[in-house]
């Protein structure tokens, strides 16, 4: 899966490339920050950043910011691009390089863009696009036309005449909504299971083009999220649910980059420095993902440990575990190989015991 998202970093001044007052998703408000748009590649429970680009707010292309652009090294030919356009550009780059993936998933900022969804569909790319709760859909193909008003001003613009559209959040209570419990992944608390429902729906574009899509509703307690997809009609609900839920791993990718790979400590003014740091961070993330994949393939889990710890799943290597082992393997090691191995075993032991404790405290995550 390719996973598209953005991540903001707080900035005090306005010299760093792309810095300005803009929405900071980490803080949930408009603030002075720098925003990067990132693409992550995930398979199963393995993930890594694979591409990214810094977002340049529109005011950065104004005549008043000419000196800022010069000092930041912005190429003269670069023009303003929205985050959605940057995301599509990265998806195209990854596809051109021959990287295999099944689908693309994104949050509501990108998912509510009918342009992006239509562009992905025209490129024969399966998508799972989160949309806001007030998005409107039809449960059968709508009939379009200009309504004949008996009272008031005469209508001049065509719109959907029938049937009645629904807000997507209304459909969670619809009589034809059927819920299925699906196991979407493992976590430190055991198996993560949520309830999912699916509807065949139609959406109408601004130019009155009609598109058939799949609406996937995920229910987690009282909270519901809504996703539109162009997945084939025969796709099982279990596949829809797991692909929709893969977006969790772009959040893990962003977290790992900042907490373990130094992205949050990086300071630079120029675009080229930002791109160099991104390349090094992606290489580090890719290397760690390969180590985790190789470790899982070469070292079978001891089934006796499941009984010893009284858990159903043993934890995989974490980014922190790989860093610990590197401390023993790199030049001028900080740890001996035995010390590094002991620390990794201690960490895995603590995580497994923590998993057992969390299972007792969060029984709802286990499902029925």
Image: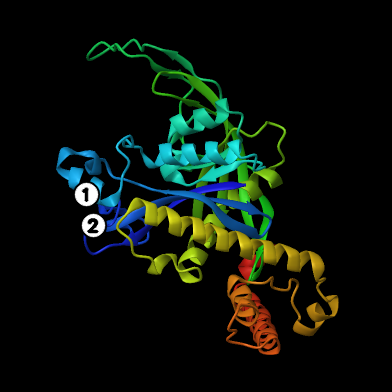
Q: Position of residue 207 (x, y in %)?
A: 40, 19
Residue at position x 39%, y 42% in the image? 83
Q: Kindly identify which residue carries mark 2.
A: 15
Quick check: can you spot residue 251?
Answer: no
Residue 46 against residue 41 in the figure, above or below: below
Residue 180 horizontal side relative to residue 227, left or right: right
Residue 250 against residue 264 in the figure, above or below: above
Q: Kindly identify which residue carries mark 1.
A: 68
- The quadrant where residue 300 appears: bottom right
Residue at position x 66%, y 41% in the image? 102
Q: Position of residue 189 (x, y in %)?
A: 63, 71
Q: Which mark is residue 341?
A: none
Neighbor class of circle 1 (other Cα within 10 Å; few <14, some 14-19, many 20+) is many
Neighbor class of circle 2 (other Cα within 10 Å; few <14, some 14-19, many 20+) is some
Q: How many marks?
A: 2
Residue at position x 32%, y 54% in the image? 270
Secondary structure, mark 1, is helix
Q: Position of residue 289 (x, y in %)?
A: 64, 62
Residue 10 horizontal side relative to residue 200, left or right: left
Quick check: can you spot residue 323?
Answer: yes
Residue 76 horizontal side relative to residue 108, left or right: left
Residue situated in front as seen by the camera: 18 or 302: 18
The reply to whether the C-beta atoms of the residues labelled 2 and 1 are less than 8 Å apart is yes
């Amino acid at each position: 899966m390719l996973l598209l998202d953005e991540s903001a970093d707080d900035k005090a001044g306005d010299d760093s490339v792309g810095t300005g007052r803009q929405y900071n998703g980490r803080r949930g408000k408009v603030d002075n920050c720098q925003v990067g748009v990132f693409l992550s590649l995930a398979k199963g429970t393995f993930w890594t950043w694979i591409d990214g680009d810094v977002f340049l707010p529109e005011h950065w292309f104004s005549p008043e910011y000419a000196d800022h652009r010069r000092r930041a090294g912005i190429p003269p030919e670069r023009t303003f691009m929205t985050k959605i356009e940057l995301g599509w550009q990265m998806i195209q780059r990854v596809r051109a390089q021959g990287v295999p993936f099944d689908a693309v998933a994104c949050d509501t900022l990108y998912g509510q863009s009918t342009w992006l969804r239509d562009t992905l569909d025209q490129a024969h790319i399966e998508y799972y696009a989160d949309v806001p709760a007030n998005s409107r859909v039809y449960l059968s193909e709508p009939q379009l036309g200009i309504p004949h008003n008996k009272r008031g001003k005469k209508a001049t613009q065509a719109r959907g005449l029938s049937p009645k559209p629904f807000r997507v959040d209304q459909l969670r209570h619809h009589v034809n909504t059927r819920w299925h419990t699906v196991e979407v992944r493992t976590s430190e608390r055991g198996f993560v299971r949520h309830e999912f429902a699916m509807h065949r729906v139609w959406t109408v574009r601004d130019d009155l083009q009609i598109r058939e899509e799949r609406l996937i509703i995920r229910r987690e307690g009282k909270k519901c999220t809504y996703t539109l997809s162009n997945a084939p009609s025969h796709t099982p609900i279990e596949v829809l649910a797991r692909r929709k839920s893969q977006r969790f791993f772009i959040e893990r990718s962003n977290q790992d980059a900042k907490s373990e790979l130094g992205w949050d400590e990086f300071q630079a003014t120029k675009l080229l420095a930002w791109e160099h740091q991104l390349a090094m961070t992606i290489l580090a993330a890719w290397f760690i993902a390969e180590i985790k994949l190789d470790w899982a393939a070469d070292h079978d889990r001891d089934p006796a440990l499941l009984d010893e710890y009284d858990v159903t799943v043993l934890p995989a290597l974490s980014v922190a575990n790989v860093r610990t082992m590197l401390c023993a393997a790199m030049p001028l090691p900080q740890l001996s190989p035995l010390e590094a191995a002991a620390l990794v075993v201690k960490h895995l032991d603590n995580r497994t015991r923590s998993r057992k404790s969390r299972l007792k405290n969060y029984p709802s995550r286990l499902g029925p």
